[in-house]
Structures are given as structure tokens and as C-alpha cells.
Image (cartoon, rainbow, N blue to C red):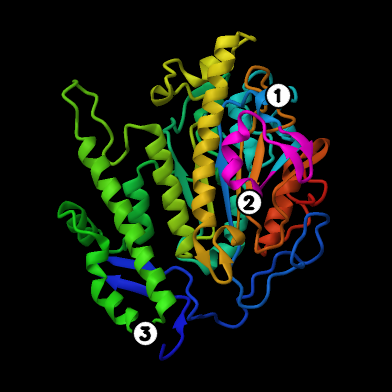
Amino acid sequence: MTNAISRRAVLRGLGVSMALPWMEGMSLPAGRAVAAGNAAVGGGMAGGVAAAAGAAPVRLAFVFMPNGVNYEAWEPVGTGADFVLSPTLEALAPVRSHLNVYTGLTLKKARANGDGPGDHARSSASFLTGRQARKTAGNDIQNGISVDQLAASEIGRRTRLPSLELACEHGPAAGNCDSGYSCAYSSNISWRDETTPMAKLIDPAAAFEQLFGDATQAAAAQERLSRRQSILDFVLEDSRALGSRLGTADRRKLDQFQTAVREIEQRIDRARKDNQPRKTPDVPAPAGIPDKISEHIDLMYDMLLLAFQTDTTRVSTLMLAVDGSNRAFPEIGIKEGHHHLSHHQNNAEMIEKIRRIDRFHVEGFSRFVKRLSETPEGDGTLLDNSLIMLGGGISDGNRHNHEDLPVLVAGRGGKTVETGRVVRSPKETPLCNLYLSMLERAGCPQEKFADSTGVLAM
């Protein structure tokens, strides 16, 4: 290679700016070291307090599951590295060494605290904010800034997109969705401030366009979509020029990256073709959104992987569904709605279906974690430089309780987290303690967040 390539290098074409994955030949500007924390964070640290200068950045992602789980089938047996995966978590076996299971964490502000019913709205509203949402179905909503947006306000200025908000289900923006709580609460987990939820991207095609399209050239973007030309076609010339400057390993990585992007484009295009308006009156399928839930979820995970791989953003959220969702899961043989089944009242058949839905969500997460672990970056993998949380604001869906929440965190946070463990916290430990630790490893430490009482030993 003749000279170093800037970390900000992009492939450019008509209305396109495609960031590149991390490569061995890339240079980093001075002062871009990514701190994993300003002080030791307790047990579970591996590799020191802060990442070395020039290290890859730490990414944060928060994936939300609605309606709680069947906790009896979720909780593993054992503690530390000596544990047995539960029936629901067995799907994590291929990536067990890449993540931690957390128990004992609580969302106190998702409880009624004098406000009466409305656990679904409160669980999603407080999931990333740790705040008590004002009970209202009107326009006077009030919540708090979410942890992802706090991170985005500090590290988001270093990337083209401060944050990326994804979802796999639409939800009403207003109205009464849960016992006097606005739909804005149950439909959103990411909040810019006390009164402003962040808009979500549901359509994988729209997410792809936001990642790689130039918003200032809408006409060119529309031309690109209408002609069904690959984004890679528009950057081919730049790609060829760059390839001549790369070493063998980096050329291979660039080829693999381009192949992955093209495959995603093809999958989105197939989904778009498959979802042409149906003959059924007034029921057109949304363009670009797959019929199969698993394919939709996998595509959104792919968008998240590409966003992190290209350093387009370092902060993201993904809602698998809105809280209170009554979605059915026909591809795993479940015709009843999720919310309906969650109120099983100890009916064995309904409990078994909830367990299958829980496992379905865990399987998707496991596939995503495996892909991150197979994506090289620097002297490790993209997963080594990420913290990816899967969880929800309700523990057992039948009880609507908010302690012992189902929480997984994959990744090593810049090689500062020891993984492959069950981390048991004392009962009533605030979930926000975990967020403090995640923020610290991402280079934006805080003294306090919402109801936190201290950093959690990850």
C-alpha cells in the first residue's frame, strides 16, 4: 500500500456516500482513542480500564423485547462461568462465550408508583430512560432522555448519524394505548428529551437509504430506487481506485463488505417485489417489509451491523415490537396474539407458546451476535468493540412485574468485559446501573443516570 487511508474514507457516487469497514491500512486522527472508562468498574474487567490509543470505537445497541417472558424457562442455573443455559436460552449455545446473562435488575419507574394500571406503556417508556412517564393520553407527555440519546449527544458528533433508531412494528404516535397512557410511550424506547421520542425506521429499504443515501440529493436517490441499480454500481470507480492502494487482506475485506451490501440490497429488492399491493381491497402490504417476521428482524439486524461496521453511527436502538404487541407468529405455528398469550394465567398450552416466542427472539439475537463475532475489526472482531443489549421492561408477562428483568449483553466493550458468565446482582439493583457501565466503556462516563446507584460490575 502506497499510503495510509483515512478512517473517514468513503466510496462516493451519484447521491451516495458509503463509509468503509475498519481496515488494517487505516489511520486514525490523533485524540481519537476510545476510553472504556475513567476508573475501574469492578469485577468483569478484562484488558485494562481504557482502550489503547488508535483502538476501534465502542458501539452501543439496545434491543427491546415486548410483553415480558416466561421467566421460569428464561433464567439459567448457576453463576459466573459455571452455568447451564435455560431452555429458552439454549439458542445462545453457539455464542455463549460472547455474552453475559444478567439477573436481579429492576425498573422501579415501570411500576405503578400510585399511577394505577399501564405496565406495558411504562415498561417501554422507562426501559432506556429510567424515568416515570407522566400518565396522560394527551399531548402533555413527559418522560426523560434515554441512555442511547445521552450517548449520542456525546459521541454522536464523531459519526455521520448520531444514532440510528430501528423497529420491526409500527405503533400509533398518539392516542390512548394502555390504561390512560399515550401511545407515544408504548411505541417508543428512544427519547431525545422529556417530550420528544425519536422517529423509528420500520422499512429495511428506508434504513438502507438512510445509511448510504445522500439526503441532499433526493432526486438521485429516487432515480436509483426506480431503476433498481445497486448502490455499489455508483461507487464502482472509487472502489477500483481504492483497491489498488490496499494490501491483500484489506482487498479481501473490501470485497467481502461489498458482497454483503449487495446481498442485502437483493434481499430488500425481493421483499419489495413480494410486497406489491395485494388484491385484497384497502390492504396493501408495506413496500420493502418482508412478510416473514424472522426475515424482517434479520434484515434490521443487518442494517445495524452495517451501520456499526462502517462507523456510520455508534449508537442504535431496535424495537422488535411495541410493548403490548398482539402480533401472531405463524412461521413458528402460533396464531394467537403475543399479548393475549402473555396473560396465560398458568394455562400450560399458552405458557408453552410464550416460551416458543421467547426462544424465537433469542434465536434472532444469537444469529446477529454470531455475525458480529465473525466480522473482523482491527486485531479482533466487531463484537469485541460493541455492547449489544437484549432485554425488556417486564419480567414475567403474566405477572407484569419489573424486577428480575430478562437482560443479555453481548460483546466485550473494547475488550474490557469478561464474557461467558451469569452476573447476578442483588434484588432491586437498578437497571440504570448497567447503563452507567455501558456509557463508561463507550467513552462517555456519567456520575449518575436516572435512578442509578452506581456502576454495575459487568
Q: Judging from the image, what secondary structure is the residue with disc 1 in?
A: loop
**Which residue is labeled 3 in the image?**
245
Viewer-closest of 341 and 374: 374
From the viewer's perspective, is 208 left or right of 266? right
Contact check, label 1 and label 2, Cβ < 8 Å = no
**Residue at screen point 63% across, 38% down:** 127
Viewer-closest of 173 and 263: 263
Marks 1 and 3: which is nearer the front? 3
Instruction: Name the residue type under label 2.
Output: His
**Which residue is labeled 2 in the image?**
98
Decide which of tag 1 and tag 3 comes sooner along the chain. 3
**Disc 2 to disc 3, how far (Cα)?**
34 Å
Q: Position of residue 68 (x, y in %)?
A: 61, 27
**Disc 1 to disc 3, how far (Cα)?**
57 Å
Question: Mark 2: few, some, or many residues within 10 Å (few <14, many ≥20)?
Answer: many
Compared to residue 116, the image places residue 404 above or below, namely below
- The reply to whether residue 418 is visible in this rendering is yes
Q: Judging from the image, what secondary structure is the residue with disc 2 in?
A: helix
**Residue at screen point 71% across, 28% down:** 402
**Which of the 4 quarters of the picture holds residue 126?**
top right
Instruction: Name the residue type under label 1.
Output: Asn
- The reply to whether residue 137 is visible in this rendering is no
**Residue at screen point 78% across, 49% down:** 456
**Which residue is labeled 1 in the image?**
401
Compared to residue 157, the image places residue 148 above or below, namely above
* Residue range highlighted in magenta: 76-100
Residue 94 painted magenta = yes
